[in-house]
Image: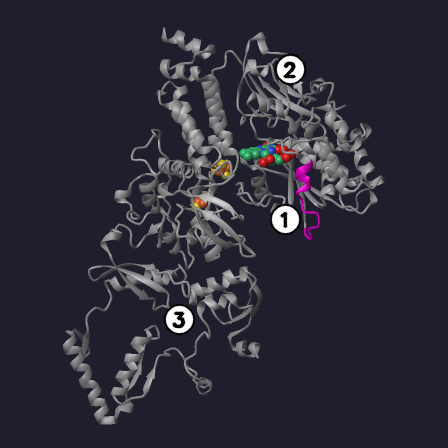
């Protein structure tokens, strides 16, 4: 009855065909059916530990976790039947008995998966009258706050993220049973260049953004879509503002580019915008001293100076250097301005010394393919890149691809570890790099 | 470190003993084992060139069921191992023995370690595994050390290692000790632990036969299960089956504990009446009346004494009576035992031993214990009993491993059979029975 190689499954009375190996959770998602969950995340391995996604499956004597139950042909699943609801409600009760329910002072309030699902699956009063668990807070570095670990529901998303995406295990679980808690290694902090994603992944307010902590409620902020200026990748962002002030930056999902991740650089550098020593007013140097002026005065002064040069020496005497982190649109405007002044001298390569290969280049140098396509390459040679620092999310693409069999090779001038499984690694002195390539 | 081994009463194993036949507490070495006919089964296999499939068929015929707790048919389990697998396959022996009341594997390993080694070599040969581990509970260090010695003996004699008995089959067996966590007895947690990870159960499927140790096909069997295998090979599956009852082949070692006159291990034919087993253990201590029995280790349902006195000790009979044979740990409680106190003790164990991975067990075991503890300490509330049952229902069958069920089952069965004692405790804030109850009555007066 199914297409060859496909399985047919019925979820809540609606049929869908899925390939072998699909889990019930994904099959339900394809039908637009939401199954409540905490530990499941499509980019992470399956842990099946929260048990929130229990559903009723035909002929199964017990409710089964949708996230970890593979679809079989002809399977019938009910995600909201009495049996399923009973199991889900039971799990929700367990999750809440030791949860502090401090939502009014919790940074996660308003964007908390536990809070949201408790509305649908929880009771208004608790049957639990025993003492509640308290878990000590931890200092795991300046970015990710682990200040209220009592809120943790032990879903292990943060741990799996470290192991599987960031490529380095920096958080783990110690203790058993009720004493289980998430910790960093003794005396260590979380230093991955992707660490901020743990904040997004944490379904409750256990891991929060330290810079953002207690500064605003999510529903007070407005959202603007944006693109990261920090590397060539162009990660998609949501910039959240209160009035004119940028309060925080979140990922905007784009499977082609940053997937659902963001590097810490992209996520936390907004703090520079609010830094007290930031240049916020135009200034003019007069008699050796800088003087704050308004924009009108500054622009008039600029025009005056440009005009003086071009009248005396011609437009070609003007050169324009643009920051390489500028967007395409900004760079376009800069060159337009320069040409308007009669100059063709525009460049953004502020740190390049040797331009002898210019003649061989046609057009702008670029990756040559979509970011998402690099995962389908069979073999890769990376030359001279501190990949994790230069392109944290590109490094993750290679990390995932290498796990699926891509052969990644690295020719580098330093023993920098990209946390990618490498097929070969060559280390040469900087002066020998070209020779090694030849 | 070599700890002294406790004194030993060979009689306790009973007249029908097969695994422990001829064992006197001192004769554990290879030469003794050979003198008892040890390693003859292995020699027979190689001399008669018995094929692996024929061995598995024989074990199936014997109706040997797993002695670790679930009673799963061993031959069937062995047949799940992929026959033509190109990579490494493993057999693992589960000697973690953490279930309260169970102390038989410890004695098998201590007094007759070679029978386990021989059983494992045969199992490995039948399933085509070339590497094996025996995972030994971490709190019986002397047993672990002795097993290492026994391994060295077996290797030196050519029963283990490369080209066993000069033939084509090689099998490397290693001892591995845990650190005493109950959860490491759950087979997938045990595998994680051998791999050097935290002992936490894996979600199944996939089962160990397809994804086991280091992701390779693996069969995990209990110590006593492996120990039964040499006898089956020597005497045939049919003879083993005849020792017991249909579908319940062989003998079984029961760990008798609690209020019996002579606690200890007794190896009897499956199907032996409980009354006869109790008699072997010297009857009730102090001649007191039997009140309750947990017939299969602390995670199995408790049954009233009078039900047990009419029940036979085999998987199917005990199941019919409303409990399970489990690991064969028989905990006997007499009329002076307060059932609330007993349950409190058990609930504390499961609360303490939950691995904390999945929500219902991590949160629920603490909730159960705290409620029972409140009742026991005179702070119970009327609604507690219903809450206990409903919390148990919310744990059972919803967890990654069976520890969740193991925590829920005692609670439900104790309340089912002894509800009035719990109600009495809640209402009167003291025990209904026993010396504690009496002592408190006196103190209150
Ligand atoms: C929480 C838990 C603890 C267990 N502890 C043990 C144990 O100590 N020894 C054991 O043999 N089996 C134990 N088991 C059962 C094992 O998972 C497994 O079923 C058994 O070792 C299989 O061997 P068998 O087929 O020979 O019985 C435990 C199971 C659970 C869920
Ligand atoms: S049932 Fe308990 S012991 Fe088993 S995996 Fe879940 S938390 Fe761990
Ligand atoms: S989402 Fe399935 S168990 Fe957590």
x 62%, y 22%: residue: B317
Image spot of residue A24 (x, y percent) = 47, 48
Check disc 1 and report its element: helix, strand or loop. Answer: loop
Asked if residue A77 lies left or right of residue B111, the reply is left
Region rendered in magenta: B75-87
Badge nearest the viewer, 1 or 3: 1
Q: Nearer the viewer, residue B253 or B178?
A: B253
Quarter holding residue A243: bottom left
Q: Which chain contains the residue that carries disc 2?
A: B
x 37%, y 15%: residue: B429
Within the magenta stretch, is there residue A181? no
Q: Are marks 1 and 3 on the same chain?
A: no
Within the magenta stretch, is there residue B80? yes
x 49%, y 36%: residue: A62
Residue placed under numbered mark 3 in the picture: A232
Q: Nearer the viewer, residue A196 or A237?
A: A237
Q: Nearer the viewer, residue A201 or B53?
A: B53
Main SS, magenta residues: loop
Residue B295 visible here: no
x 52%, y 39%: residue: A59
> Mark 2, residues whose alpha carbon is within 10 Å: few (<14), some, or many (≥20)?
many
Image spot of residue A310 (x, y percent) = 23, 91
Relative to B426, does residue B192 appear above or below in the rendering? below
Check disc 3 and report its element: helix, strand or loop. Answer: loop
Residue placed under numbered mark 2 in the picture: B281
Residue placed under numbered mark 1 in the picture: B216
Would you say the residues marked 2 and 3 are in contact, meaning their CB atoms lie under 8 Å apart?
no
Going by the picture, which residue comes out furthest to the front? A1
Would you say the residues marked 1 and 2 are in contact, meaning their CB atoms lie under 8 Å apart?
no
């Amino acid at each position: 009855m199914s297409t060859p190689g496909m399985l047919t499954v019925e979820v809540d009375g609606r049929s869908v065909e899925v390939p072998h190996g699909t889990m019930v959770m994904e099959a339900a998602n394809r039908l637009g059916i939401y199954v409540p969950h905490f530990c499941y995340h499509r980019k992470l391995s399956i842990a099946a530990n929260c048990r929130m996604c229990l559903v009723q499956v035909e002929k199964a004597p017990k409710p089964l976790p949708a996230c970890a139950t593979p679809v079989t042909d002809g399977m019938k699943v009910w995600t909201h039947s009495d049996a399923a609801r009973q199991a889900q409600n039971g799990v929700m009760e367990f999750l809440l008995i030791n949860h502090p329910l401090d939502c009014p002072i919790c940074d996660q309030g308003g964007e908390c998966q536990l809070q949201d699902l408790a509305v649908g699956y929880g009771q208004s009063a608790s049957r639990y009258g025993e003492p509640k668990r308290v878990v000590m807070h931890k200092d795991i570095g300046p970015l990710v706050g682990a200040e209220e670990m009592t809120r943790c529901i032990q879903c292990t998303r943060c741990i799996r993220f470290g192991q599987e995406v960031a490529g380095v295990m920096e958080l783990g679980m110690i203790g058993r049973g009720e004493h289980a808690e998430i910790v960093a290694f003794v005396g260590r902090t979380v230093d991955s260049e992707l660490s901020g994603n743990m904040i997004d992944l944490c379904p409750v307010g256990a891991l929060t953004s330290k810079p953002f902590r207690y500064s605003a409620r999510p529903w007070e902020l407005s959202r603007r879509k944006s693109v990261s200026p920090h590397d060539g990748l162009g990660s998609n962002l949501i910039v959240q503002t209160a009035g004119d002030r940028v309060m925080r930056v979140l990922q905007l999902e784009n499977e082609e580019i940053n997937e659902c991740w963001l590097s810490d650089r992209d996520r936390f550098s907004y703090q520079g915008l609010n830094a007290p020593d930031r240049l916020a007013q135009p200034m003019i140097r007069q008699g050796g001293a800088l003087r704050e002026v308004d924009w009108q005065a500054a622009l008039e002064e600029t025009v005056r100076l440009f005009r003086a040069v071009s009248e005396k020496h011609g437009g070609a005497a003007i050169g324009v250097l643009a920051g390489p982190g500028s967007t395409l649109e900004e760079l376009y405007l800069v060159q337009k301005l320069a040409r308007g002044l009669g100059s063709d001298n525009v460049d953004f390569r502020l740190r390049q010394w040797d331009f002898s290969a210019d003649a061989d280049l046609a057009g702008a140098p670029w990756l040559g393919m979509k970011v998402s396509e690099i995962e389908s390459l069979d073999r890769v040679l990376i030359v001279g890149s501190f990949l994790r620092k230069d392109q944290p999310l590109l490094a993750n693409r290679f990390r995932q691809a290498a796990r699926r069999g891509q052969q990644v090779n690295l020719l580098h001038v330093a023993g920098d570890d990209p946390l990618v499984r490498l097929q070969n690694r060559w280390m040469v002195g900087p002066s020998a790099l070209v020779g090694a390539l030849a | 470190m070599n700890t002294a081994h406790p004194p030993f009463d060979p009689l306790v194993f009973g007249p029908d003993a097969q695994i422990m036949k001829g064992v006197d507490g001192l004769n554990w070495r290879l030469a003794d084992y050979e003198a008892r006919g040890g390693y003859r089964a292995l020699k027979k296999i190689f001399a008669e060139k018995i094929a692996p499939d024929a061995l598995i068929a024989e074990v199936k015929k014997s109706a040997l069921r797993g002695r670790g707790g679930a009673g799963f048919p061993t031959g069937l389990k062995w047949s799940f191992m992929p026959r033509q697998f190109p990579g490494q396959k493993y057999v693992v022996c589960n000697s973690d023995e953490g279930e309260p009341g169970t102390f038989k594997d410890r004695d098998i390993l201590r007094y007759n370690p070679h029978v386990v080694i021989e059983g494992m070599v045969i199992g490995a040969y039948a399933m085509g595994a070339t590497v094996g581990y025996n995972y030994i509970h971490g709190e019986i260090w002397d047993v672990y050390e002795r097993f290492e010695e026994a391994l060295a003996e077996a290797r030196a004699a050519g029963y283990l290692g490369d080209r066993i008995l000069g033939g084509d089959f090689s099998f490397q067996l290693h001892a591995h000790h845990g650190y005493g966590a109950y959860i490491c007895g759950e087979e997938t947690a045990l595998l994680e632990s051998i791999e050097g990870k935290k002992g936490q159960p894996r979600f199944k499927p996939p089962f160990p036969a397809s994804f086991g140790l280091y992701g390779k096909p693996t069969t995990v069997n209990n110590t006593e299960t492996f120990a039964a295998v040499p006898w089956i090979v020597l005497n045939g599956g049919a003879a083993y089956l005849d020792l017991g009852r249909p579908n319940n082949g062989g003998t079984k070692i029961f760990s008798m504990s609690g209020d019996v006159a002579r606690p200890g291990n007794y190896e009897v034919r499956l199907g032996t009446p409980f009354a006869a087993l109790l008699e072997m253990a010297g009857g009730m201590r102090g001649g007191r009346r039997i009140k309750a029995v947990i017939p299969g280790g602390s995670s199995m349902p408790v049954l009233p004494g009078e039900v047990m006195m009419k029940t036979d000790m085999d998987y199917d009979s005990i199941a019919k009576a409303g409990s399970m044979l489990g690991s064969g740990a028989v905990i006997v409680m007499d009329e002076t035992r307060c059932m609330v106190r007993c349950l409190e003790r058990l609930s504390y164990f499961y609360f303490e031993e939950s691995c904390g991975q999945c929500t219902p067990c991590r949160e629920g075991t603490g909730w159960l214990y705290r409620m029972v503890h409140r009742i026991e300490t005179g702070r119970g509330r009327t609604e507690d009993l219903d809450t206990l049952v409903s919390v148990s229902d919310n744990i059972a069958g919803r967890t990654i491993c069976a520890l969740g069920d193991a925590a829920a089952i005692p609670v439900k069965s104790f309340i089912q059979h002894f509800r009035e004692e719990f109600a009495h405790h809640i209402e009167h804030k003291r025990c209904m029975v026993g010396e504690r109850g009496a002592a408190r009555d006196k103190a209150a007066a």
